[in-house]
Amino acid sequence: MEDERTPIEPSGLNPGVAHNARVWNYWLGGKDHYPADREVGERVFGMFPGIVHVARADRAFLGRAVRHLAGEAGIRQFLDIGTGLPTVDNTHEVAQRVAPDARIVYVDNDPMVLVHARALLTSTPEGATDYVDADARDTGAILKAAAGTLDFDRPVAVMLLGLLNFILDTGEARGIVRRLMDAVPSGSHLVLTHPTLELGGEANAEAMRFWNEHATPPITARGSREIAGFLDGLEVLEPGIVSCSRWRPEFADLGEAPSEVAQFGVVARKP
Ligand SMILES: C[S@@+](CC[C@H](N)C(=O)[O-])C[C@H]1O[C@@H](n2cnc3c(N)ncnc32)[C@H](O)[C@@H]1O
């Protein structure tokens, strides 16, 4: 974060400890981070340079998945949990370019994201956006607050991008996904991204160990079998659980990025 832009520190915001939302913003080339975030961001980059490609490929995947959902799949409602700091092409901007009447609820538990949330509340007049300050584990509170904007009798795209990796216990993470998907009707979708060592090798493991000693919240990687476990009872869309950069790539995303990154991406439909 630029010094002149941080006169007030909201409760819970600790500039001295690197926070994921701010470091992610740093890797994405944003401006909303403190020296502690930049330092950890650089150290992780030094151990695992692929992290920058992971962050950018994840956002590009978000764009392609949301365009597919708002377009071909006809989805008009999005529940984006673990939103991150506002950046280029937030979910509502992508969705409302395709479907101006799309309704989006964002959820994050980082105080800095809350401070910047008004940048997410720039809906089209036909659609709606809202922001909920909540922990992903508190699905009851999230669903209750989101019901003010979303109609849970109609399909919803539940988006958990780079989020379940902060729920270290796999059983707890599965419970979160199950409770969310139980609350939405047939035709709803689940969109996931998740870091993995299967595509990233040991360098990513070392970087994650460093992260867990110096930053917050602690993170874990998962393999494709654990990711598949999150999709129980859902129909996985083609091309399945793949490097998020390989999920329906578009010409515009090819550029200089590597074709594979250490981050799985998947979209699945509730039958
Ligand atoms: C890696 S960023 C991903 C941001 C965005 N979804 C994307 O894919 O670009 C993860 C976000 O999840 C948020 N987060 C982490 N743990 C959370 C939790 N338990 N509840 C809600 N949000 C959480 C962090 O604050 C951060 O903004």
Image (cartoon, helix red, strand yellow):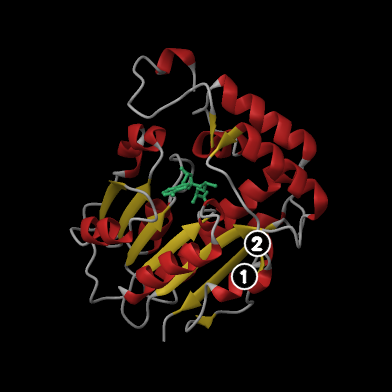
Residue 226 numbered mark, or none: 1
Q: Which residue is pictured at 74% across the width and 50% down the height? A: 257
Q: Is residue 50 above or below residue 16?
A: below
Q: Is residue 124 above or below residue 115?
A: below
Q: x and y percent of residue 96 in the render?
A: 35, 58
- The quarter of the image holding the C terminus is bottom left
Q: Respond yes or no on whether mark 2 lies under 8 Å from ligand 1.
A: no
What crowding class fits label 2: few (fewer than 14 Cα within 10 Å), some (14-19), or many (20 or more)? some
Is disc 1 in contact with disc 2, using a CB cutoff of under 8 Å? yes
In this orientation, which residue lies closer to the viewer: 114 or 4? 114
* Residue annotated with mark 2: 222
Residue 36 numbered mark, or none: none
Mark 1 lies on a secondary structure that is: helix
In this orientation, which residue lies closer to the viewer: 122 or 252? 122
Whether residue 158 sits left or right of residue 101 in the image: it is: right
In this orientation, which residue lies closer to the viewer: 237 or 251? 237
Mark 2 lies on a secondary structure that is: loop
Q: x and y percent of residue 39 in the render?
A: 65, 24
Q: x and y percent of residue 48 in the render?
A: 77, 42
